[in-house]
Image: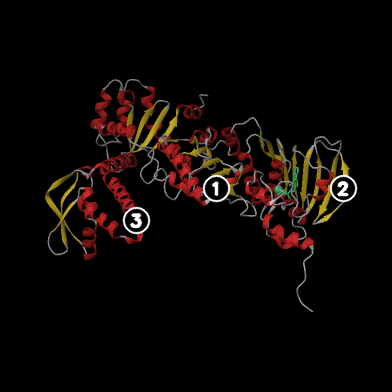
Amino acid sequence: MGQIIVLDRNMINMIAAGEVIERPASVVKELMENSIDAGATKITVSVEDGGRKLISITDDGCGMNAEDLSCAFDPHTTSKIKTSKDLQGISTLGFRGEALASIASVAQVKAVSRTKNSPGANCIEIDCGNKSSLSPASVDYGTTIQVRDIFYKLPARRKFLRTTNTEMGHITEHFIRIALANDNLDMALQHNGKELYRLSDRQDIRNRIDELFFSEFGENLIETESSEKELHLFALLGKPGISRTNNKLQYVFLNGRFIRDKFISHAIKEAYRGCIEPSRFPVVFLFLKMPYENYDVNVHPTKIEVRFYNANLVHSQVLGALREKLLGTNLQTQAKLPPAENLRKGDFSSAGHRNREITDAMAEFFKKHSPIQTQQQFGPALKKHYAPLHPNARQVTESQAAPSGPIGKKEFLQIHDSFIVAEADDGFIIIDQHALHERIIYEDLCRRIQKSNLESQKLLIPESFQLTDAQADAIGANAELLEKLGIELAPFGPRTYAIQAFPTLLAKAAPVDFVKDLIDLLTDKGLGLDAEQLLDEVLNMAACKAAIKAGTKLTDNEIEQLLADKETTERAGHCPHGRPTTIKFSITELEKQFKRT
Ligand SMILES: Nc1ncnc2c1ncn2[C@@H]1O[C@H](COP(=O)(O)OP(=O)(O)O)[C@@H](O)[C@H]1O
Ligand SMILES: [Mg+2]
């Protein structure tokens, strides 16, 4: 006798369920999507024990009549498509007719539903594929589906469920995605009888984000909208200061469906290039709309991936729109301090390391400068304050002589020879002098090099250095680049070269050090850079070396120049490596901290 048998229907469904129903969160996702497809305006999700014990979803959608309810839990039953032609432009979230059958094959399910014009509701129960007959029920129109004890007949699958917190985390994530994509719906999420979210349909998307993420982003989201050809884009772009170590806070929606797409992720990454450190990920909420016929959703069981028919176009439009907005915006980070309560208690644990650093910096600033704030005239108290801090106090003393004082007149101040504190219209900013100067030089270098070779000056005494044959070859091979940079090198003996001329703009860098590092870069084939990237790397390096270092005392004129250049430099909010150059503290935030409001 042969070994092969045909599996019975329940077995087939149980196995198929593995594809769509991985954990309680998958049930929540599928049921919520069904409610949205049913035209619901209100959805309530209630779960117990991380969804292990109960998942219950109630909507006020179109409901199902007796006939539909009795077959909705059978495999491959759907009201959303009829012929293969319908697959070419799917406008609903579901269409595979698998979810309810899969869920009902791995749990105890009870569904009650009523259409708007039917006098009564119907109820059906399915226990791991075993269906009861319909019975009457009395509820308002809409649908409620309750899913109990998921995987209870599949101990191997149940064993894989994680802690209540982890499962609840997954559920919340799906709830958030659906809530972001449908800000026109009333929605609630409850866990063990406690309400986690209640979202009103009257919220706009910004309010909804505030509520979903506990106002974490505040002023740090920039809005942009564009419509080109058949793609409409609306985005809220996180400023670099709120970037993350992973891409979890990149939410991309296509016609109301949360998707992950490598072309779009790439476009986002490219758009932020130079604004953010390469290892970080920006916070982005991106809402795309395009004709349903322009992409295929039938590529992945959970429909999280789609296939664009013209992926390049999507990529270039997303990149273009985001990049244009980011370049044209002041990306200065708005400092967010820990709640005033925490500040007083000295408890920073919830506020995180970054906030703590900012608060420390601020506390330091006010500790030092409180006399400035309280006394309009600057007397001995102030001098006493400065004297031990600045051995080179001449300049400070001079400015104190002016009756208006440093903050009053100059409106800036250098602290620890590394940071500049300056007054802004609605608060004050702290500038990292090295990072800002680096950006200014970098932009200046880019501008100049686009026009012609960098201006250079002959060294009075040529500086010589030794190199290997490979390095000498690299000099020969990159003659054009060196000329562009305004660097003149000449052989000066065996394996020795001399620097004859050096770019004026890099006056602060030591020529030999710079040229040696440059040659290292040119010989590092591992980097695999094309000519443009190489030039960019070189300019980056040049800017870093030529920029004033932290720990350097600056004169008033230098600070004034730096502040003036900041205003005219593109992307001045971040250094070329993407680190912030400036952090802003608003008056509103300060008033909150000092409990003035
Ligand atoms: N909440 C609901 N309200 C009204 N009808 C529903 C609801 N949930 C499911 N249905 C009906 O049951 C059918 C099967 O659902 P499902 O198995 O999720 O497949 P799909 O969503 O892919 O069609 C749906 O096509 C729809 O007609
Ligand atoms: Mg469905």
Mark 1 / mark 2, whichever is N-terminal? 2
Mark 3 / mark 2, whichever is N-terminal? 2
> In percent of the image, x 30 and y 21: which residue is there?
404
Residue 437 at x, y percent in the picture: 31, 40
> In percent of the image, x 63 and y 39: which residue is there?
179
Q: Residues within 10 Å of mark 3 (few under 14, many from 20)?
A: some
Amino acid type of the residue that numbered disc 3 sits on in the rendered structure: Leu
Residue 201 at x, y percent in the picture: 66, 32
Q: Residues within 10 Å of mark 1 (few under 14, many from 20)?
A: few
Q: Can residue 154 be seen at all in this image of the molecule?
A: no
* Inter-mark Cα distance, 1 to 3: 29 Å
List the single residue furthest toward the left: 460
Callout count: 3
According to the picture, the residue beneath numbered tag 3 turns out to be 529
According to the picture, the residue beneath numbered tag 1 turns out to be 248
According to the picture, the residue beneath numbered tag 2 turns out to be 134
Label 1 close to label 3 by CB (< 8 Å)? no
Residue 484 at x, y percent in the picture: 23, 48
Colouring rule applied to residues: secondary structure
